[in-house]
Amino acid sequence: PLGLFYAFAATACWAIAAFPLTAASRQLPVNSMNHLRLLLATIVLFMTGAIIEGSGFWQIFSSPYSKAWLWLGFSGILALVVGDFFSFRSYAILSPQYGSVLTTLSPASALFFGIILIDEHINWVGITGMCITIFGVMSISLGRTQRSKIPDHGYGSVLRGIVFGILAAACHGGALAFSKKGFIKQPAEYSIGPMGATFIRVVTATLLIYLISILTGKIKTVLLHIKDSRAGIRNTVSGSFFNPILSVSLSMYAILFMDVAVAQTIFALVPLFALFIAFFVYKEKITTRSVLGVVAALAGVALLIWRNRIIQL
């Protein structure tokens, strides 16, 4: 139950963050927004980690935690640099309501990497669930009729938005498996807390993205874009509080209590949260087809969650 609580809380945070961060991605270049978002998250997580985990947080800077930095650091780069870049490009094109539907593909990626990295396996019921989820998303929620109803925001073709969403889902699912690998590889006497793990993921991603900008001579342009958009800064700050500060931290707590495939399956419920937020807060219309698509995806998610019990019946 505790793991489910953390997983659902993280999912809600991702759904809430999608809206201000989508607005920010239309007011700032995605690269500039990511620079600001990750820097803010690094500062906040450093302070909160030191307060919540105390001396345990400071120990992550010692040599026994080198493996944690390797696995968690790579996870942070894959999710927060590569995956989020594709996510925000997808959201800018499709809108959070439609773009978040593609997150239902993440469990398949989490299971694939979970089998390879941490020896997690899935039975035929789980595979069936993944197929139903993917079919529901691709043939109903983003079918030809639905694609024609997506407003053209001028940020690229719908097909490109779908491709970006699929790539983002693959990165985020794989990154979760790499994160759990970091927990497993860490010796018991040098265990790492969820806040410390989150900080490692975020600070590694932040250092890499700034290093690339400095080496390529683009850092000045990145900072100028941030300076010139107050609305972009405001939306980035509000969105960053929910993603990655809260969402990533809660997801690290969640995978301590459950398999990465199950956790990522719950994270795939972002479209359900996003639909209600879009309807109640932003007054966006919910079409029958989009609801059917989410229901189909959730049916597949349910099979994934209960796959072991179903096989025993």
Image (cartoon, helix red, strand yellow):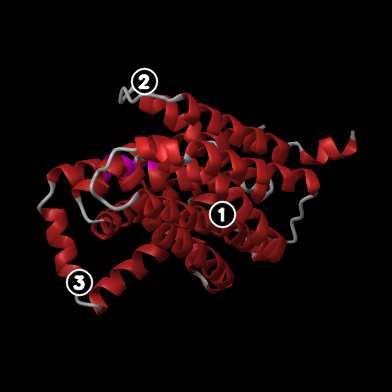
Tell whether position 239 is magenta.
yes
Q: Amino acid at mark 2?
A: Phe
Return the residue nearer the eye: 37 or 54: 37
> How far is mark 3 from mark 1, CA to CA?
30 Å
Q: Main secondary structure of the magenta part?
A: helix
Residue at the spot of label 2: 280
Tell whether position 201 is magenta.
no
N-terminal label among 3 and 2: 3
Q: Which residues are magenta?
A: 236-242
Residue at the spot of label 1: 173
Asked if one can make out residue 257 in the rendered structure from this viewpoint, the answer is no
Q: Amino acid at mark 1?
A: Gly
Residue at 32% in and 52% down: 157
N-terminal label among 1 and 2: 1
Asked if one can make out residue 306 in the rendered structure from this viewpoint, the answer is yes
Q: Amino acid at mark 3?
A: Lys
Residue at the spot of label 3: 218
> How far is mark 1 from mark 2, CA to CA?
29 Å
Q: Relative to 308, is 299 above or below?
A: above
Residue 142, position as x, y percentages in the image:
47, 41
Q: How many residues crowd around disc 3 within 10 Å: few (fewer than 14), some, or many (20 or more)? A: few
Query: Seen from this angle, which residue lies furthest right?
Result: 313
Q: Secondary structure at mark 3?
A: loop
Residue 65, position as x, y percentages in the image:
56, 68
Query: Seen from this angle, which residue lies furthest left?
Result: 228
Residue at 74% in and 56% down: 120
Residue at 12% in and 60% down: 224
Residue 69, position as x, y percentages in the image:
52, 68
Q: Relative to 83, is 229 above or below?
A: above
N-terminal label among 3 and 1: 1
